Amino acid sequence: MGATLSVKEVNGATPGTPNTITTMIMCTKDVYNPGTSYPIPIIAGQTTRSYWKSIYLNADTTPDGTINNIKFYCDGDLTGWTGITCYVGTTDTYTQVTGTEGETGDDSTVATNNITSYTASSPLSVSGSITNPNTGKISDYVVIQVDVDGDSAEITSHEETFTWRYDET
């Protein structure tokens, strides 16, 4: 039987205790699950940013053998996203997000690639592996940030599914 995996989000300076993601909400505070608090403001003539999110793949139970060859991607078409661009990147080192709380996040130096570039046929490679009998953090951090273009005639977003793929041998 294969391992049970989850996706974890970390926040804070150290980072703090990881939270299991069911829905990731982009906002302007370094917090897990803000609900509708700390939305990304739309300001004419400006680009505002979310605080970036640092997430990783986690083994909740031990794999039968090894988990590796980790990939991350979207469907390549953020249909319904107008005036919003989603960026992604990977890093082996956690860095706490910075910005002006409630207003805008600073531009991430990691999340620099448009996520629509990564699809099932051309996914983002994510370093990391874990072997039996270990559990815990498997992958490097995947860092995600969204930019909102205040000059766009329309700003719309919706739920989007991001996919993790890996080998378990």
Image (cartoon, rainbow, N blue to C red):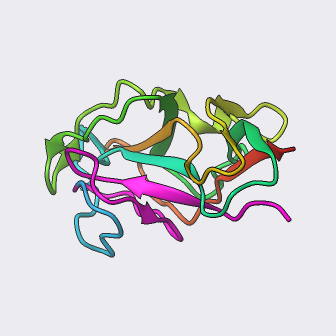
Up-down: is 60 above or below 118?
below
User: Which part of the image, by quadrant, shows the N terminus?
Assistant: bottom right
Up-down: is 42 above or below 49?
below
Residues 141 and 83: in front is: 141
Up-down: is 112 above or below 167?
above
| SS assignment for the magenta stretch, majority | loop
Residues 40 and 139: in front is: 139
Q: Residue at x 41, y 42 (%)?
A: 145
Q: Residue at x 33, y 64 (%)?
A: 32
> Where, by quadrant of the figure, is residue 49 drawn?
top left
Number of callouts: 0
**Residue 134 in view in this figure:** yes
Say if the magenta span includes residue 25. yes
Say if the magenta span includes residue 59. no
- Place of residue 27 in the rendered image (x, y in percent of width and height, measured from the top left): 31, 58
- Place of residue 14 in the rendered image (x, y in percent of width and height, measured from the top left): 23, 45
Q: Does 70 sit left or right of 81 as displayed?
A: right
> Where, by quadrant of the figure, is residue 76 drawn?
top right
Residue range corresponding to the magenta coloring: 1-29
